[in-house]
Image (cartoon, rainbow, N blue to C red):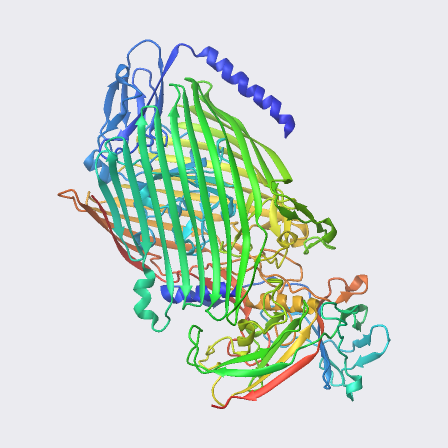
Amino acid sequence: MNNLKLPLSLLLWYTCVMSGLAQESYRIIRGEIYDQQTREPIIGATLFIQELNDGSTTDIFGAYELKLPKEGAYSIIVRSVGYKEVVIMSDDLDKDIPIYLEAEIEQMKEVVVQATQVGWKVSPEGTSVARIGVEEMQSIPALLGETDVIKSIQLLPGVSGVGEGASGFNVRGGSVGENLALLDEVPMFNTSHLFGLFSVFNPDAIDGVSLLKGGIPVEYGGRLSSVLDVKTKEVDNTSFAGQGGIGVIFSRLTLEVPIAKEKVSLLVSGRRSYVDWLARPFLGDQEGTAFNFYDLTTKLQWKINAKNELSFTTYAGKDTFEAIGFIGFEWGDRSASLQWKHLFSDQLLLKTTTYWNDYRYAFHFGNEKDAFDWSAKVNSYSGRSVFSYFLNDRNTVTFGGQVSRYNFYPGKAENIVYRNTIPTFELPKMNALEGSVFLGNEQQLTEQWSLNYGIRFSSFAYVGAGVAKEYREAEEKGQRKVPIPEEERVYTAGQLIQYYPNLEPRIAATYQWKEEQSIRVSYHRMTQSVHLISNTAASSPLDIWYPSTNNIRPQLADQFSLGYQRDVPQKGYEFSVELYYKHMTQMVDFIDGADLLLNSNLEGDLLEGIGRAYGVEWQLKKTEGKFNGWISYTLSRSERKTEGINQDEWYAARFDQTHNLSVVGIYEWNPVWKCSANFSFISGTPTTAPSNTYELHGYSPAHNPENRRNNYRIPSYHRLDLSLTYDPISKGRWDGQWVFSVYNVYNRQNPFSVSFQPNTNGLSSSIVSNNEAIQFSLIGSIVPSVAYNFRF
Amino acid sequence: MKLLNTTFGLLILLGGVACEKVIDVDLEEGQTQYVVDAFITNELAPQEIRLTYTKPYLQKTIADPVFDAEVLVETVGTGSVRIFTDADRDGVYTWKPTNRQECFKLNNRDQEDVISANYDKQYRLQVKHGPYHFEAYTSLERVPRLDSLKYLWERSGVPYAESILAEVWATDFKGKNDFYWLKTWKNEEFLNMGEEMILIHDVSQEYNSNPSLDGITFLSPVRYGVNPAIETDQLGQKKAYSNGDSIYIELHSLTETSYFLLSELKRNMTTGGLFAAPVSNVPTNIIPMNQVSKGKVVGVFSGSAVSSFGARINE
């Protein structure tokens, strides 16, 4: 890759300079657009320069950038769906005075559309970038009527989940641990509550989310498959406001408190489940049963002046699951981040973030007499600066860097035996440093062509104190490797054990014509040095986060994509299609029967393989009228190949889903009543099935003589949900809303997993081989619910 | 991972919406292999080695036996040979020691912490059938005495407080890496669920979990391992102990190899539920001796010293 470095930097330099020289007769106007009432930035608002038949749109911060000839006055039409149109003369545009749009009351109720709705302009990023605003999320039927970030993005093309009960989400055939989920720039290790039924992002506390799947910009890295960028909302700094909801499983409350008017404001947003309280009367003597989660997001925002803004965001969330006081799990993230936005000049913006995150996961069983406690955690500390330099009207350069320190505690076990505490057994702490520097440019080459390109240099250092082991190659590939005692090396604190540098080029080119159609081609390389080690059907709270070491190299992915977008503005339709191909190397794989928990030789159970994922994603969206919604369909394949596994042949990855179809329809009778439906169909995911069995000491194990992996597909998943929203017109400050929903309308028992087990339950030991295939469904029935949401 | 799944079962009870059901599946067919089922002990009783063929996973009938095989177990070093024969042609090859002297011998440790040189190399099994030739090795390691059995009529915080709960007491030998297998019979019926297969490393069921756990009383999951894994079966029959039931327990010593193979066997049969690990084959210690035999055999050759304890529950 090194041989690419020089030509790329030259290209970057050349294109910047050349386009800078050519475009001096223009001026750039930048500013922001906000909702007049909520003071939240409006994403995707359009600014249309009538005289030039040209325009621009706002980004996720509500910021816009408009290119105008140096001389002359122009009228700019500012539009956003659900807002009254305004016309502003170019001379009145000022970066220090934001544009406030007034909500168009009737229309706002009627149109529940994607936040990226841009009216006449096709979003040039196509399906590689998906943005969902909270409004749009709320219009989709959800489990128990609770709007959910992850459940919503799973309805987008190329995104899926393994099913109810599976944490997280999968993007383009990648595993759950391959997504970088950011909450105000802090990576969250756990994204799910209640074993994946809800996500950790409280919809009341956020503005919207962006999911980046292809052509990922240089400032993001560290995970292979995607970036889920969740931003907490801009806090209302003019008046006290609140919102919340009461649901079957949990309730939530969010308060926005202005502390110093238009300067300092505070957001406090929390959720707490009470399913265990509700279930208590039915549990009888099963005391000590707890099953709950909470999360608390706070944000203190201080707009110091026009050039400086500070914000301090914290998150604390925990899931607790305790069964009859005997067995329990706990897991959750805690984080704090401080962000400083500083405008050096009209051209240079800096965003600096420092954060700390602590992710803990634990499991225990027993009582005061005999007990076993297992726990693990990951601590990360990081600092990151991103500069945006508006070089000229055609080039926006992004550059910066990030340094992170990780401390991994892969497992600790404490035992009490007959009231005696046995000395703790702990896998040694592991330390790592991760750094990156990046430089990118977003460039408008011509009216039709635009480019976004750059390079990211990432490095990962596995450092002491610690003991590094070497493993003897197994006699046969795909078997357990054992450590070589004489090769064991002890490292002191801070001493380098292994270093991995990587260059990650990124480029995306867009060709747009007739303002309605565009083609985008992109390539990116991503690396991942921190791995989620899991060999179970679903990601579980006990999956281990583990760094790259002297035995595990960082995983690499190169992705190519080609997309076409078309907008039919007269009819309110948008269509997009995108092809992608992803090639992955140095992928972490497992031997058959890998042992992950408290295994001091875990690395001996890991293998390195390659992977490939490819597919085509379609999306047809209707964005206007009383009836709107979208259809998205993905046809894809995701495969792995590892020496010693599956006879060295390609095999389907655990998340391979051939067909993935989502249909979302929303119909609004009037501003008070609205109904919506969504239907999902996902092909069965692969699992390893036995072909044979044999009789051994009265037992009948599952056996796969050809050593095939993922050779059987579980039945397909499909589900229909309906919801009805009653939103009476509020007379005072209080605005209430009822959401009635039915999840899994036709009562399908969707498979979560299929396991193969002998049924000895109730059979005498003289009968052997009563083997069965057992399908497990987490939500095996229709789930009706009602939720009440309010705002004041 | 099983505990996790059990726990999830409880979660499902809370939600009341999850379910498990048996489904029809169409599985691909794999090649047929030999199965060597060879567990020998130091007891003065007929020693049996069963030879069969593998069969399709969902086939409910008894496996086809292997006839006319040559089966013998040899003491490594001395060359003394025991020939196992299948007189009644059912695939079960038998050899019967006539006195204590003839029985398989214990492989004593010289010191607490030093395993003997012929650990796992004390006895050699040879199986020949047509062109196929297999070998395997094992040894019979030390086994502690089972001290006592306790019954509890009530205990909080366990899944079935109403029933009688049995607890076996024994103490692990000092010195690392003793491996055992606890087998239980209720009313002369072997507890044969995968979960009821109690495999012990020193004092706990965890392999390599805590080096300080050695030479003490077995931990509680082991001690309670003599109870049926479920309270009532699918047919509504009570499985947990009641007054008048007989309990018979055997503790078998294992070598590290056979402990590992049986752990994999247990894991293979007990995976399921939400966080199920994928199917992985149970490894074998049966070695193919020629090219044609490669990839043609599964099974276990394991030797055990046995201690036992029997009782009848009387209030």
Q: Taking A621 as reference, is B313 left or right? A: right
Q: Residue A559 sits in which quadrant?
A: top right
Residue B220, image x and y in percent?
Answer: 53, 73
Q: Quadrant of the N terminus of chain A?
A: top right
Residue A325 drawn above or below residue A718: below
Q: Taking B10 as reference, is B308 left or right? A: right
Residue A34, image x and y in percent?
Answer: 28, 30
Nearer to the camera, A120 or A490: A490
Asked whether residue B24 appears in the rendered view, the answer is no
Residue A496, image x and y in percent?
Answer: 63, 39
Nearer to the camera, B8 or A658: B8
Number of residue marks = 0
Asked whether residue A557 appears in the rendered view, the answer is yes
Residue A260 drawn above or below residue A415: above
Q: Quadrant of the C terminus of chain A?
A: top left
Q: Residue at x 61, y 74 (%)?
A: A699
Q: Residue furthest left?
A: A731
Residue A675 drawn above or below residue B75: above
Nearer to the camera, A212 or B22: A212
Q: Taking A624 as reference, is B78 left or right? A: right
Residue A462 drawn above or below residue A75: below
Residue B118, image x and y in percent?
Answer: 79, 69
Q: Residue at x 19, y 36 (%)?
A: A105
Nearer to the camera, A340 or A576: A340
